[in-house]
Amino acid sequence: MRQSRHPIHVGIWITISPSEQGVLHCVKGNGVVFQNMASLKLAGWQIEGFYRFQGDTR
């Protein structure tokens, strides 16, 4: 995630339901927050990329 030119932040993508999806991340002064895409955009965050776990889930 980034707010300027360089990515400097990480979060965890969470899908609660098809209509409730967003990023759980920590914001200075606010602590841990869950924000959907519209809220992230309003706060100036951009998602630079994703990493997906490809291993065994057992």
Image (cartoon, grey):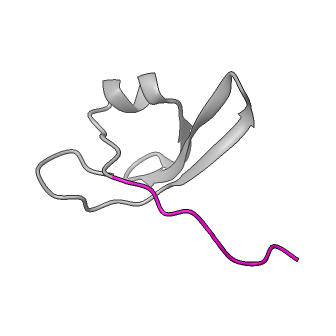
Measuring 69% from the left and 40% from the top, which residue is drawn there?
15
**In the image, residue 35 lies at what x, y percent?**
52, 35
- Which quarter of the rendered picture does the C terminus lie within? bottom right
Q: Residue 2's x, y, as percent? A: 26, 50
Image side of residue 57 versus residue 1, left or right: right
Please tell me whether residue 2 belongs to the stretch shown in magenta. Answer: no
Q: Please, what is the dominant secondary structure of the magenta stretch? A: loop
**Residue, x 39% and y 49% (percent of image)?**
29
Q: Is residue 28 left or right of residue 12?
A: left
Instruction: Give the image location of residue 20, x and y in percent.
Output: 67, 27
Is 36 rendered above or below residue 54? Answer: above
Quarter of image, res 56: bottom right
Residues shaded magenta: 49-58
**Along the line of sight, the residue nearer the viewer: 46 or 53:** 53
Q: Outermost residue, left direction?
A: 5
Residue 55: x, y in percent? Answer: 69, 77
Q: Is residue 3 left or right of residue 41?
A: left
In the displayed structure, does residue 16 sit left or right of residue 45? right
Q: Nearer the viewer, residue 28 or 37?
A: 37
Count of numbered tags: 0
Above or below, 52 relative to 3 = below
